[in-house]
Image (cartoon, helix red, strand yellow):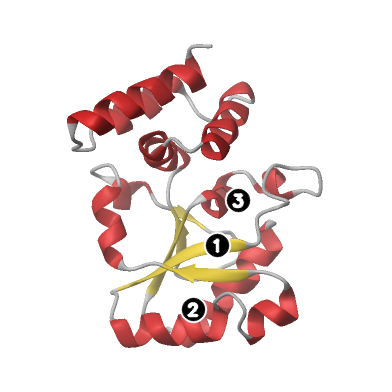
Amino acid sequence: MNLQALQHLSKAAQSLADDCRIIVLGSASLLASFPDLGRRDGPLASTFDADLCPQPFDETTGRMLEEALGASHAFHLRHGYHADILRDDIFETLPPGWIERLVAVPGCTNVFAIDPHDLAAVKLMIARPKDLELLKLLHANAMIRPELARQRLDSIAKSDRYIMLSGNAFDQVFCR
């Protein structure tokens, strides 16, 4: 995925859900802040989807977007990338204040991406190896700051299991 593909996909979603704001989550959200991550040799070059959530969310709009822009549907088959339409309960997993830190997707009206540090906090909670590798790359290139990632991570309510998991993930990314 590159910024042009994200813009294309976002504009298609916005045209279908013109009464909604579109929120970009997941790794593709980084393109709003760091377009170079989508260059041919960049870490997002092998990403072919963007996680989108219309706001306000309703099931009819969600289904419409999924049918129009989702995996294995016409848009995907024609362009080679697609949208994963998320429900608004995903916002419960984000750090408090995330909405005030949204980043406008360049070239798009009413389309916003989550802040890279908010994304980092979520990826530390999930702690998948591919996500930790991406965070290591962002940290090595001074695109995310450990203290801000820690602050956002600590602000998310989590069980003891996720406190341990995310703490270990933080150490793997920022302390090695």
The amino acid beneath tag 3 is Leu
The amino acid beneath tag 1 is Ala
Q: Are discs 1 and 3 less than 8 Å apart at CB? A: no
* Residue 165 screen position, x and y as percent: 34, 28
Residue 42 vertical placement versus 172 (above, below) = below
Q: Are discs 3 and 2 less than 8 Å apart at CB? A: no
Residue drawn where x is 18% and y is 35% of the image = 159
Disc sitting over residue 50 in the figure: 1
- In the picture of the structure, the residue carrying the numbered disc 3 is 31
> SS class of the residue under badge 2?
helix
Query: In the image shown, does 7 or 58 lie closer to the viewer?
Result: 58
The amino acid beneath tag 2 is Gln
Quadrant of the rendered structure where residue 150 is?
Answer: top left
| N-terminal-most mark, 1 or 3 | 3
Residue drawn where x is 50% and y is 86% of the image = 67
Please tell me how crowded label 1 is: few (under 14), some (14-19), or many (20+) other residues with Cα within 10 Å. many
Residue drawn where x is 38% and y is 26% of the image = 148
The image shows a total of numbered marks equal to: 3
> SS class of the residue under badge 1?
strand
The answer for how far apart the CA atoms under marks 2 and 1 are is 14 Å
Please tell me how crowded label 3 is: few (under 14), some (14-19), or many (20+) other residues with Cα within 10 Å. many
Disc sitting over residue 14 in the figure: 2
Residue drawn where x is 47% and y is 24% of the image = 145
* Residue 106 screen position, x and y as percent: 59, 59
Left or right: residue 105 versus residue 159 is: right
Please state, as top left, top right, bottom left or bottom right, where the N terminus lies in the image. Answer: bottom right
